[in-house]
Image (tube, rainbow, N blue to C red):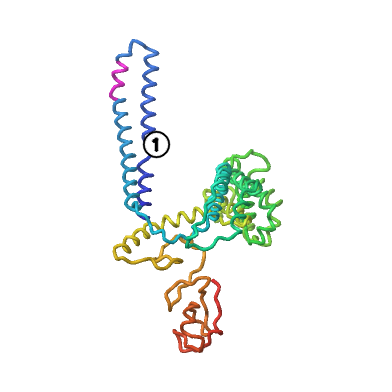
Amino acid sequence: MDVLELELSRLRRDATLSRSIDDVDKILQQLCKARDSIAAEPNTAPITLAKLQNPVKQGFEQVTEDLKKVYSGQSKYGKALDKNFPAKALPTEYDALTSHPTLINRAIAMHLLREGQFNVASTFFDEAQDNQLQISPHSTGPSPSPQHQGDFTSLRSQELQNKFSNMYRILHELRSHNLLPAIEWARSNSALLEARGSNLEFELSKLQYVWLFLGPSINGLPDSPYNGVAGAISYAREHFGRFQGRFLRDIQQLSAAMVFASNLRDSPYRHIFETESAWEEVAASFTREFCSLLGLSAASPLYVAATAGAIALPTLLKLATIMKEKRTEWTTQDELPVEIALPERMTYHAIFVCPVSKEQTTESNPPMMMPCGHVIAKESLARLSKGSKFKCPYCPNESLPRDAREIYL
């Protein structure tokens, strides 16, 4: 994946049409200038056209050169894709989702709704209902749950679509530097957000204070008593009182910054008033909290799964080639045979590997802590003890299987 990211960065840097567009604009300007000159003095047409010949020819040559860079960048990136993702089929003897077509449909539908593609989602609902997949009687995957079909149907509710529509409306306003709709939403859900320990409402109010403090020359709002330092003070008096219990220190810093209003750049509070990244951060925080109140993760599960699969694919393809050469088989259905290094943002659960069996614990084989404090998997515990008193494999202490306690990660 590092090679692909490097080639993609080069493609973005070199294979851009902006240079070609600029060169074409220059040619058009030269032609328009010549046209105006000929229109003003028709007798000079031969001389004007003669002078125009070389610049236009050079301009077209430059456009061609620019396009060569674009074609070259696309060709190199295509070769990198072919090299890292060769057309090889992975083994499909075991597919954990074969018996769960409804779960797959639900993930796709939820992704479309989260992206605001409501018309596409509606079409997908219709086609998924009309073309329901039949589960193969020879499927090796886990048995489907009757609840999944109901969960899929529930996504079609107009209420859910309205909620996501409202989320995108507020996000649009945030990207236009209008905080009021987001603040209104946070206030209406204040109790739920506070129960989650969220500071979204205060962060929105804080950014509104900062935005007003910077004044009309920065925020573009009308120059009135409700803008500038005076407007920020008025806003703080009206809205910051309810936040003093949790965010007193932040409020004090915002208040102390007034002393440096004429020279914020050299003040110890300048970092508070740097808003370059604040808007994206508060938009991400709003999306996360909005989805959390709906019982959803901040990122689309389908996007996360597809991204993780793309990261793992080169390693799995290499593994499949090695197994074919050595004539070995992938014997573990519920685990990957190799470790896949995923980004930290995609790590959602703690992982424990039994030091005895070297296998990752599961729900059916959870980690067990013995009285001495050492932890092994439940199956390893059963093999060591055989139902009677046994010695810890890492210290001299002895104990009974019933003395071990399950650990919840």
Q: Quadrant of the N terminus?
A: bottom left
Verify whether residue 169 appears in magenta: no
Q: Residues within 10 Å of mark 1 (few under 14, many from 20)?
A: few
Left or right: 56 as drawn, with respect to 333: left
Report the residue marked by disc 1.
Answer: 18
What range of the chain is rendered magenta?
47-54
Task: Give the residue at the far top of this rendering.
Answer: 43
Residue at 64 percent of width and 60 percent of height: 247
Left or right: 266 as drawn, with respect to 197: left
**Where does residue 245 sit, x and y in percent of width and height?**
68, 62
Q: Quadrant of residue 58?
A: top left
Residues 314 and 205: in front is 314
Q: Quadrant of the C terminus?
A: bottom right
Residue at 31 percent of width and 47 percent of height: 79
Residues 8 and 217: in front is 8
281 vs 67: above or below: below
Q: Look at the numbered disc 1 and give the secondary structure of its residue.
A: helix
Residues 228 and 205: in front is 205
289 vs 52: above or below: below
**Where does residue 333 sit, x and y in percent of width and height?**
44, 66
365 vs 32: above or below: below
Task: Give the residue at the far front of this rendering.
Answer: 137
Q: Principal SS element in the magenta part?
A: helix
**Badge 1 amino acid:** Ser
Residues 57 and 102: in front is 102
Residue 19 shows up from this direction: yes
**Where does residue 266 sit, x and y in percent of width and height?**
52, 52
Residue at 68 percent of width and 54 percent of height: 189
**Where does residue 201 sit, x and y in percent of width and height?**
64, 54
Residue 263 shows up from this direction: no
